[in-house]
Structures are given as structure tokens and as C-alpha cells.
Image (tube, grey):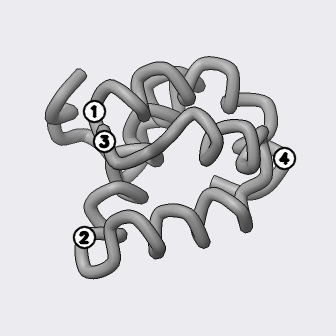
Amino acid sequence: MNQEQFGQFWAQLRGPLKTQYDKFTDDDLLKIEGNLASFIRTVDTRYGAKKGEVSTWANRRFAHWSGWYQDYDKPMAGG
């Protein structure tokens, strides 16, 4: 997902993101506020080696939200 897509999707992502990945704080979510680069930095800070897992989860949620399922045909873990 690119910056434009992430910005449009942010309102739908932030709640499930905090539920699924509890290391995200309310302050993190305010700092990210639809900015993909901030999201990537925060994921790296909070999840380090597991950052690929978080990014894949977010991309799958975006794929389901947008209806664009290419490369994300496997079921989503954690909703």
C-alpha cells in the first residue's frame, strides 16, 4: 500500500491495529495519523524483528477493505 492508500485507510486501521498489536500506544497512533513513513518507523520501534508480520497484517486488512485481493488470498489472522 502506498502513502495515499494508507492515508485513506488509516481511520479503518487504527482501532484494529491497536487491538491486534498492543504495543502501539495512543501517542503512537496520534503521531502516525495516516502517515505511512511514521507507521513504518513505529512498527520498527515497537516490533523490531516482527515488523514484517505487522506490515503484512496491515496490507491484508487494506486488501480486504479495498476489495483488492491480489497476493492476499490467504485468510487474515486476527480479523
Q: Spatial distance from mark 1 to mark 2, Cα to Cα? A: 13 Å
Which amino acid type is shown beneath numbered disc 3? Tyr
Q: Secondary structure at mark 3?
A: loop
Compared to 39, does 12 lie above or below?
above
**Label 4 CA crowd tier, 10 Å (few <14, some 14–19, many 20+):** few
What number is the disc on residue 58?
Answer: none
**Count of residue discs:** 4
Which amino acid type is shown beneath numbered disc 4? Glu
Q: Spatial distance from mark 3 to mark 1, Cα to Cα? A: 4 Å
Q: Secondary structure at mark 2?
A: helix
Q: Nearer the viewer, residue 22 or 17?
A: 22
Please provide percent x and percent y for residue 19.
Answer: 32, 25
The reply to whether dot 4 and dot 1 touch (C-beta < 8 Å) is no
What number is the disc on residue 21?
Answer: 3
Please provide percent x and percent y for residue 60.
Answer: 38, 41
> Mark 4 or mark 1: which comes first in sequence?
4
Q: Residue at x 42, y 33 (%)?
A: 17
Please provide percent x and percent y for residue 3.
Answer: 79, 55
Tell me if 36 is positioned left or right of 78 in this view. right
Q: Quadrant of residue 30?
A: top right
Frontmost of labels 4 and 3 is 3
Q: Spatial distance from mark 4 to mark 1, Cα to Cα? A: 23 Å
Q: Which residue is mark 4?
A: 4
Q: Which residue is mark 2?
A: 50
Q: Which residue is mark 1?
A: 20
Which amino acid type is shown beneath numbered disc 1? Gln
Q: Spatial distance from mark 2 to mark 3, Cα to Cα? A: 11 Å
Q: Residue at x 56, y 28 (%)?
A: 14
The reply to whether dot 4 and dot 3 touch (C-beta < 8 Å) is no
**Label 3 CA crowd tier, 10 Å (few <14, some 14–19, many 20+):** some
The reply to whether dot 3 and dot 1 touch (C-beta < 8 Å) is yes
> Mark 1 or mark 2: which comes first in sequence?
1
